[in-house]
């Protein structure tokens, strides 16, 4: 009988402890925490801008019955390193000597959610390198409440936009590439800026016909206004390209996962599984850009403009594609072919050398056009 009473006490005690633990957990969930409502801000620096200001504020997850003090600080550079490692980017930290806070502290009044504004001033912006993105991480904390995990740092991305006003004209123009003997792409990326004036049944962007090519349309089976990746198997987008409009288009293949993806303006438009070992870009009729010269079943020319034509021996990530649409360092790891097509490549005697300085393509002459307005990706 005594043992039964003891057992009942244990059960009751366990229930009370469980209820107490649940109450504690619920209490912690309802506890006010400070955080940044928006974690990322993109600031575009125009040529005439040297100073920019931003209203910095944080907020509470729930209202508090008393005033909450908050403080701001520029986060340690290691935060930028962690961000780059996580997302596969190469951002540099903005020079903190050009950063000023109107105050490092602020308050969230009793019964309010948002802190009073603090002015974040960024200066010396005129010296930013065109096309390079810098990142400034700002942290928030409070001695009164804890921070919301993962939401205590706001990232400010600063860049001076690249203005591309010179592009390569394609109608019957092309570039044929002979890669070094033994070249074999397991993973790869094709990418370019693309503007189509007129669509035909089959419009060559780049690649090795019959092996691994990126094109628009493939009549009669594929509409002439969708992107197609054609290799050991074919797939295409359902969304359609419009003429008279700039796009950034990319085809990637990651051999370890067997996943291939078509991106447009940094957004995934289509994907498939190939599961192939890779391919030799020199096989069959070889690698061509813009059309396939002397191909017996039609040369399949592109009618429009291209710029920033690149081939990689790695599958570029979505973040990497977004970060480098308008320019990339010619010395980047994995970049094996790079035509800027802005007039910087010399064309002599039917030869055009790429921006990496390693590849000489043959060409019938690429005409460089000066645009009335810079390339814009919407």
Image (cartoon, rainbow, N blue to C red):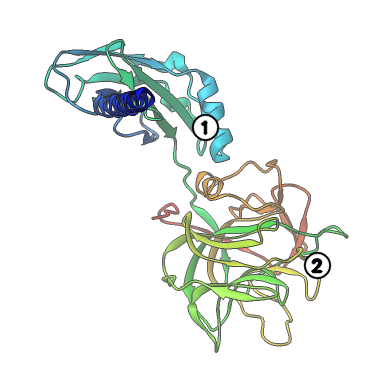
Quarter that holds the N terminus: top left
Q: Nearer the viewer, residue 298 or 255?
A: 255
Q: Which residue is mark 2?
A: 282
Q: Secondary structure at mark 1?
A: helix
Residue beneath disc 1:
83
| 258 to the left or right of 317 | right
**Can you give x and y, in whole percent of width and height, for residue 123 in the image?**
38, 20
Q: Are marks 1 and 2 in contact (CB under 8 Å)?
A: no
Which mark, residue 122? none
Whether residue 171 is visible to the viewer of this picture, yes or no, is no
Q: Nearer the viewer, residue 86 or 357?
A: 86
Residues 350 and 62: in front is: 62
**Mark 2: which secondary structure?**
loop
Give the image location of residue 223, x and y in percent.
Answer: 49, 82
Alpha carbons under labels 1 and 2: distance apart: 38 Å
Q: Is residue 113 above or below residue 321?
A: above
Residue 350: quarter of image: bottom right
Instruction: Name above or below for residue 178 compared with residue 145.
Output: below
Position in image of residue 12 (x %, y %): 30, 27
Residue at 51% x, 60% y is 263
For the C terminus, the image quarter is bottom left
Q: Position of residue 103 (x, y in %)?
A: 28, 11
- Taking the image as shown, residue 373 lies to the left or right of residue 220, namely left
Mark 1 surroundings: few (<14), some (14-19) or many (≥20) residues within 10 A: some
Which callout, 1 or 2, points at the residue further toward the start of the chain?
1
Count of marks overlaid on the render:
2
């Amino acid at each position: 009988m005594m043992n039964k009473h003891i057992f009942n006490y244990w059960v009751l005690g366990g229930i009370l402890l469980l209820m107490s633990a649940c109450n504690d957990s619920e209490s912690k969930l309802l506890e006010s925490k400070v955080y940044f409502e928006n974690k990322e801000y993109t600031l575009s620096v125009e040529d005439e801008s040297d100073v920019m200001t931003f209203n910095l504020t944080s907020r509470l997850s729930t209202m508090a019955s008393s005033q909450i003090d908050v403080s701001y600080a520029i986060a340690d550079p290691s935060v930028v390193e962690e961000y780059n490692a996580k997302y596969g980017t190469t951002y540099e930290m903005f020079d903190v000597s050009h950063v000023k806070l109107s105050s490092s502290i602020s308050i969230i009044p009793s019964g309010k959610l948002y802190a009073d504004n603090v002015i974040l001033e960024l200066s010396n912006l005129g010296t930013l390198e065109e096309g390079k993105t810098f990142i400034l991480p700002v942290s928030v904390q409070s001695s009164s409440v804890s921070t919301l995990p993962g939401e205590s740092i706001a990232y400010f991305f600063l860049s001076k936009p690249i203005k591309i006003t010179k592009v390569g004209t394609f109608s019957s123009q092309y570039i044929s590439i002979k890669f070094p003997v033994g070249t074999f792409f397991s993973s790869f990326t094709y990418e370019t800026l693309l503007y189509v004036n007129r669509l035909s049944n089959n419009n060559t962007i780049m690649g090795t016909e019959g092996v691994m090519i990126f094109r628009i349309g493939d009549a009669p089976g594929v509409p002439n206004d969708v992107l197609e990746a054609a290799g050991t198997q074919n797939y295409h987008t359902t969304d359609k390209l419009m003429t008279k409009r700039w796009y950034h288009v990319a085809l990637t293949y990651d051999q370890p996962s067997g996943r291939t993806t078509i991106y447009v303006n940094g957004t995934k438009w289509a994907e498939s599984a190939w599961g192939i070992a890779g391919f030799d870009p020199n096989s069959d009729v070889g690698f061509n850009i813009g059309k396939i010269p002397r191909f017996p079943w039609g040369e399949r020319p592109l009618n429009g403009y291209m710029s920033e034509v690149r081939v990689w021996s790695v599958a570029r990530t979505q973040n990497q594609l977004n970060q480098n649409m308008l320019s990339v360092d010619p010395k980047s790891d994995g970049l094996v072919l790079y035509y800027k097509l802005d007039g910087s490549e010399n064309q002599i005697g039917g030869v055009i050398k790429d921006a990496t300085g390693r590849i000489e393509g043959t060409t019938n002459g690429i005409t460089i056009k000066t645009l009335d307005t810079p390339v814009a990706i919407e």
